[in-house]
Image (cartoon, grey):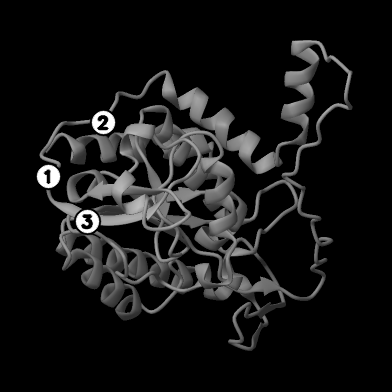
Amino acid sequence: MGAPGEGFIQPPLRRRPSARMGAPGEGFIMNPRLQAEDLASRLPPLLVAAERVAATVAAGAHGRRRSGPGEAFWQFRPYQPGDAAAAIDWRQSARGDRLFVRENEWAAAQTVWLWVDSSASMDWRSGRALPRKLERARLLGLALAALLIRGGERVAPLGGGAPPMSGGGALARLEAAMTQPGAANLPGVANLPRHAEAVLVSDFLMAPAELEAAVRALAATGCRGHLVQVLDPAEETLPFAGRVRFTGLEDEGGLLVRRAEGVRDAYVRRLAAHRDALAAIAAAVGWSFALHHTDRPPQTALLALFARLSREAGR
């Protein structure tokens, strides 16, 4: 959706906080509490927020782990910090100078694969008191990942090529993968094991046929999935009045509306029809669909999403 152009002030660019952490000088011993506070202060704010949201939801969430066969080999992947030593395949690792972990198909399928849309339409908000859609979508994705990792599961970016990850540092690596240039494109099925589980978070302001093609391709592999639509409240109600120029954020051009209130009802009906189409796409392949507005608490959406994943795991 385009942002009003006349009278609209583009907020200043945000400087991305650094994830690098310095260490005290040699011979300097820091109080453990002060050391923890210093460490937390150096974490990217998004990761801190995600951990906070996950901690709030964890109290009311139930685990989703289940047992299953794990004999079918899927792939070797490079060892990552946090991987169990018992998972290392020493025979494969002996062939080179890197450690490799052996992954079985069932274990890979229990990884939750995440995709957060970073296209231009996501980088918008209707007011300074609200988060941008992209900020909220990444927060939901990372908070869900934090919950899953707390439960001993693994997460992986869908379509990014990075392997499943868990343990310490996984959230930071996942955030880095979410910001890669290709994250703006709908994900494909490359490197996705059979019977995987995926979560796609976007405003889904795209042609339904485009989304349907991607969803059906994923579902054809046996992938279970969940669509989470993130919208700004102004996109839901079109609260503008009078003469307004809407500017497309993805090269759609501009549109001057002389009386915005005059097109409100038609706009609301068209948005409802678009959402119905998205829900139908998900239902046709047995996926779930949910809507989240950026003026609502992220904890509510996260708890509902985690509950849906837990029900899927129990089947």
Residue with the mark numbered 1: 71
281 or 219: nearer the viewer: 219
> In the image, is 307 to the left or to the right of 201?
left
Of labels 3 and 2, earlier in sequence is: 2
Q: Position of residue 289 (x, y in %)?
A: 30, 54
81 or 265: nearer the viewer: 81
At a point 42% along the width and 34% down the height, the residue shown is: 149
| Residue 196 in view (yes/no) | yes
Q: Is residue 20 above or below residue 237?
A: above
Q: Position of residue 239 (x, y in %)?
A: 61, 61
Distance from the alpha carbon under mark 1 to that under mark 2: 21 Å
Distance from the alpha carbon under mark 3 to that under mark 2: 22 Å
Element at badge 3?
A: strand
Quadrant of the rendered structure where residue 154 is?
top left
Q: Amino acid at mark 3?
A: Trp
Q: Position of residue 272 (x, y in %)?
A: 37, 64
Residues tagged 3 and 2 counted as in contact (Cβ below 8 A): no
157 or 125: nearer the viewer: 157
Quadrant of the rendered structure where residue 200 is?
bottom left
User: For mark 2, does the 10 Å Cα neighbourhood hold few (<14), some (14 to 19), or many (20 or more) residues?
Assistant: some
At a point 70% along the width and 42% down the height, the residue shown is: 44
The tag on residue 74 is 3
> In the image, is 1 to the left or to the right of 286?
right
User: Quadrant of the image for the C terminus?
Assistant: top left
Residue with the mark numbered 2: 64
User: Quadrant of the image for the N terminus?
Assistant: bottom right
Q: Is residue 142 above or below residue 119?
A: above
At a point 30% along the width and 34% down the height, the residue shown is: 307
Quadrant of the rendered structure where residue 35 is?
top right
| Residue 227 in view (yes/no) | no
Q: Amino acid at mark 2?
A: Arg
267 or 4: nearer the viewer: 4
